Amino acid sequence: MNENERQVRQITQKSDDFAKWYVEIVQKAELADYTPMKGMMVIRPHGYAVWENIQRALDLRIKATGHVNAYFPLFIPESFLKKEAEHVKGFSPEVAWVTIGGKEELEEKLAVRPTSEAIIGHMYAKWIKSWRDLPLLINQWANIVRWEKVTRPFLRTTEFLWQEGHTCHETAEEGEAETLKILGLYKEFCETELAIPVLSGRKSLSEKFAGASMTYAIEALMSDGKALQMGTSHNLGQHFSKAFDIKFEDRSQTLQYVWQTSWGMTTRTIGALIMVHGDDSGLRFPPRIAPVQVMVVPISIGNWRESVLPVAQAAVEGLRSAGVRASIDAREEATPGWKFSEYEMRGVPLRIEIGPRDIKAGQAVLVRRDTKAKETVPLASLTSRVPVLLESIQAGLMAQARAFLEANIRDASDYQGFKDILENQRGFVRAPWCGGEACEDRIKTETMATIRVIPIDGDEEKTPGPCVACGGKGQTVAYFARAY
RNA sequence: CGGGGAGUGGCGCAGCCUGGCUAGCGCGCCUGCCUUGGGAGCAGGAGGUCGGCGGUUCAAAUCCGCUCUCCCCGACCA
């Protein structure tokens, strides 16, 4: 057993049992913990700090595009949910209900929101009277409850956190433009901040949001070859405005229903960070969203408290004033080696080791988490070198994830080849599809793969071959995958 | 919700089939010494109503019934 193997002996290897590796990391890196209630987890401080960084970066973008934040109630009257037929049908199997308040049985039961279109639609009807009130661009950060049968930390929990945008527009074109703008915003966010490359496009009708006219999504590829939906942007058309009577008087004095969109991203993205970037030593957080970007470990030898510690602390101070989220672990009771492994597990992008030898040489040892490569840097140039390295790590993780994604998009022209890819290699399969639900169903039943996205017109060639399932005329190319 | 596996100090497990002494082991934790450049060592110590409820029995971690939770594989979903 070499050194590298010894240090990771406590975690399940990723290649050995991916699912087990995942839940072990979640718990050992203290991102989340189970509670006595099924499907309900505690997001622990280390996990919540990641969520706060995601929130900050995403909120900035949402606001930069003209949206404002508000907060709507947790509860939604049953009658509201029932107003949009498809909506209630889609969500009713997974809604939690409040039927008693204190000791009183409620006259009308209240849904714990599975999403907020209904309550927001009701309020919008009250607020919107004129074209001058449009566009209405509101976002909320909230918790959501969906009574799922199968749960997994971050990926699918009974209660989860998200942001949901709900907008109203004068025209169908504006609604569609907003839907696509957000889709692009999500894609840029995932790639820039999370270092997770995504495929974007529309969903098939069977996969679209209950009550939408069209759902667009971004999909990422986890390192076990399964796809994960990272965010959705829905063009709601006039479905909800008609159900909730959201009307405005337009510029030519005609009464019209507004055109709406809704879109969301959730705490699931944390699960994606784990599964896209994690390795056998633990997490690898992209620097931009890492709670701690740099951990300084003073090498505790001899009179290190007098000789090493002050230098290490000064280094942390210097990095902090340079805008780096730096921290120091000066605990006496843990050995340096233990700390190295610990911060690798927790995904800290960069480790700085400072010991007596380094001080003598006026340098520090920098170890990047993504490649584990070491370099020595003069103490005086830490504040200039560290930001460069952090950017390089961010870019490195992205490059690695993109290479993996690209290597795992495979074309299939016939059904046997299609099945072989899903059976032996997983990843995305790009294949022509006739647009028929029968073929979609058959593929799902026989291969467990679903259409993740259909490229938006113009993004892909327009003359697909025959449908990979039925051999009929191909209408479009679609990306299929087994998904979480 | 269907099929399979599991629940015993913080973590990982043994014990259960065939009921019986103070429920054991490794890691972790506490104290002290000694160490510290990849998860150190020695000595002493703390911590468990065996997931919960009920039943059988002189006696239950162990047998029986119900129930909760977790994991895996399907059907449903961000």
Image (spheres, rainbow, N blue to C red):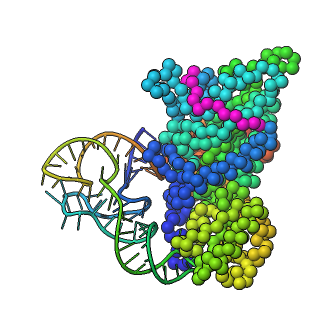
| Residue sitting nearer the eye, A179 or A97 | A97
Q: Residue at x 65, y 31 (%)?
A: A72
**Residue A384 visible at all:** yes
Q: Residue at x 63, y 38 (%)?
A: A142
Q: Quadrant of residue A248?
A: top right
Residue A112 percent coordinates (x, y): 55, 32
**Which segment is the magenta one?**
A67-79
Residue A245 percent coordinates (x, y): 70, 19
Please tell me how many numbered marks the rendered image carries.
0
**Residue A53 drawn above or below residue A103:** below
Tell whether A107 sits left or right of A218: left
**Residue A337 drawn above or below residue A476:** below
Q: Residue at x 49, y 44 (%)?
A: A39
Q: Quadrant of residue A143?
A: top right
Q: Is residue A18 magenta?
A: no
| Residue sitting nearer the eye, A395 or B22 | B22
Tell whether A328 sits left or right of B42: right
Residue A126 percent coordinates (x, y): 71, 20
Farthest residue to the right: give it. Answer: A252
Residue A410 percent coordinates (x, y): 68, 54
**Residue B6 drawn above or below residue A319:** above
**Residue A234 visible at all:** no
Q: Residue at x 70, y 61 (%)?
A: A325
**Residue B19 drawn above or below residue A234:** below
Q: Quadrant of residue A236?
A: top right
